[in-house]
Amino acid sequence: MTATIEDLAVVGRRIEFAVHRSLIDDTATLWAPGIITGTETGLNGSALARVRLDGQRSTRTVPADYAGLRYLDEIAPVPELPMGRFLPTVNEAAFYEKASVVIAPIGEDGEELVILTADRAKARAAALAHARDIDLDVDYLDLNALKAAWAVFEWEPEDGECLWTVRLDAAEGDDMAVRVHYLPA
């Protein structure tokens, strides 16, 4: 008897997801391991799978019959997401490397910038590199507004409005506090 997509797309099923899919040669497809965290029904009644790749916090919703989704035999408990404070790295969501430091655009439209360095010169260089990358006229960038601060970053729940938040009112010695420079809009 052949298993249906509904039989395969179950919470806890280990999967491989095509991060980069070659339509010509499947051996050129880059597959990443993950797990199904939930299922739902699409607007047209089709089955959807909520997939979280290993080492990531965000979940993507894909059609359960998507060709870039391989179902593995293993079914395991869905791991809890880490919560609370964390130290950002470029491997995390919305953290980038510019001029050899980690940065994070924040604010409603990403118009503010948190730069993870205590070195003001490095913070300025990273802000300028970021502005150039997003085609912002650097003449309008007010680098005099760059402020040093202590910050703590905290994970939000998976279905929250954002993946993480930052508090810029931390103090040296606070748990997981890191020295940053903040560039307001």
Image (cartoon, rainbow, N blue to C red):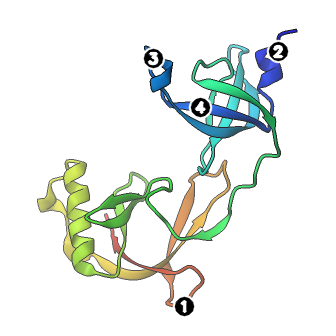
Q: Who comes first in sequence, dot 3 or dot 2?
A: 2
Q: Are marks 3 and 1 in contact (CB under 8 Å)?
A: no
**SS for callout 1:** loop
Q: Which residue is labeled 2 in the image?
A: 3
Where 70 falls versus 79 (above or below)?
A: above
Q: Do the residues labelled 2 and 1 touch (CB within 8 Å)?
A: no
Of badges 3 and 1, the one in the foreground is: 3
Where 123 falls versus 141 (above or below)?
A: below
Quarter of the image where one finds residue 105: bottom left
Q: Where is residue 19 in the image (x, y as percent from the top left)?
A: 50, 33
Q: Which residue is labeled 3 in the image?
A: 25
Amino acid type of disc 4? Phe
Q: How crowded is mark 4: few (under 14 residues within 10 Å), some or many (20 or more)?
A: many
| Extreme residue toward the bottom, this view | 173
Q: How far apart are marks 2 and 4 (CA)?
A: 19 Å
Image quarter (top left, top right, bottom left or bottom right) of the N terminus: top right
Q: Which residue is labeled 4 in the image?
A: 17
Q: Which mark is residue 173?
A: 1
Q: Distance between the residues labelled 3 and 4?
A: 16 Å
Q: How far apart are marks 3 and 1 (CA)?
A: 53 Å
Q: Position of residue 165 (x, y in %)?
A: 54, 64
Q: Which residue is drawn at 57% across and 86% down?
A: 174
